[in-house]
Amino acid sequence: MKKITLFLFLSLHFFANSFVVAETNWGWLTMFPQRRLVPAFPANPTAHQFSAGQILKNRNVIGSMGAILPVANLQWDWFSAQLSVGSSVYAYLNPPEDVNLVTADFYVDFVLIDFPLTEKLTLRVAPGHTSHHLSDDAYVASGLQKATEYVRDYWEIFAIYRSEELKGFVYGGAYYNYIYQIGREIHKPWLFEIGGEFLRTRIVENVVAYGGIDIKIRDDSHFATTQNYQLGVRFLNGSGYSLRLALNFRTGVDERGQFVTQHDRFTMLAIYIDI
């Protein structure tokens, strides 16, 4: 199972980040569209993105490599949809200690299907998978005899609404975990998520300030939350990519499956690349 998961992740990650292709239009089908229908969720701590952040209280580092690649736009009469693939790996490192890599967490959205319902409202449906692993160095240093096997296979459904009044967008949705293991099978299938990006304010040309919120409500933790609040600056360019510098305040249940029973609170300064 782990080998299959790793293969799928690497395949999608390579596909999402290695190919540079031109948009091709065939009437009702547009391959590799340049514009994403749904923007990145900036404050989501597990979004598909490139990032590197340092936790201020202990100098530990959280980094990620990932992206969402739009594969096709479909347009037939009244029906339209955008199909994308997404993958990422998140790593937690503690450079001040002997153990450098603590955990590696893999996320794959096999196909993200975005349906524009109106000019402002979009519906997203997707099947996905995540597995979280303790690194070999951390495994030895911790003295554990057996690491926790953390696996989730899920379906997600989200609504995304663009708001001129909020100068951004809001989103809300749920994950239904039809396979969920934390060392054993867990029958706590629901994970709810709400958030958004607000108050986009132009500072100078191609530089925009913003605020972001992401809150996850977790069935597996008696509906305790993981919360991330973000203040950032986005640097834009003509390619459609953007660079962000942001301050995050995170509190609640640990996102890492190896430490899902723990709670943490910290401030992190991070840099992001949105592709």
Image: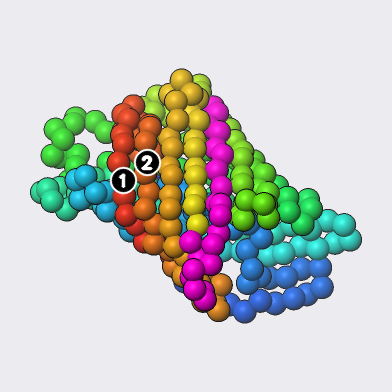
Quarter of the image where one finds residue 66: bottom left
Q: Secondary structure at mark 2?
A: strand
Q: Does the CB distance between marks 1 and 2 fall below 8 Å?
A: yes
Up-down relation of residue 158 to residue 198 (above or below): above
| Residue at x-position 45% and y-position 30% | 225
| Residue at x-position 61% and y-position 55% | 168
> Residue 88's x, y, as percent?
44, 55
* Residue 175 shows in this picture: no
Residue located beneath label 1 in the image = 267
Name the chief secondary structure element in magenta. Answer: strand
Label 2 environment density (alpha carbons within 10 Å; few <14, some 14–19, many ≥20): many
State the scheme by which the image is colored.
rainbow
Residue 250 or residue 122, whichever sits in front: 250
Q: Secondary structure at mark 1?
A: strand
Residue located beneath label 2 in the image = 250
| Residue at x-position 59% and y-position 58% | 39
Horizontally, residue 165 falls left or right of residue 136, namely: right
Disc 2 marks a residue whose amino acid type is Arg
Measured in 3D between alpha carbons, the distance from the residue under mark 1 to the one under mark 2, in whole angstroms, is 6 Å
Q: Which residues are magenta?
A: 189-209
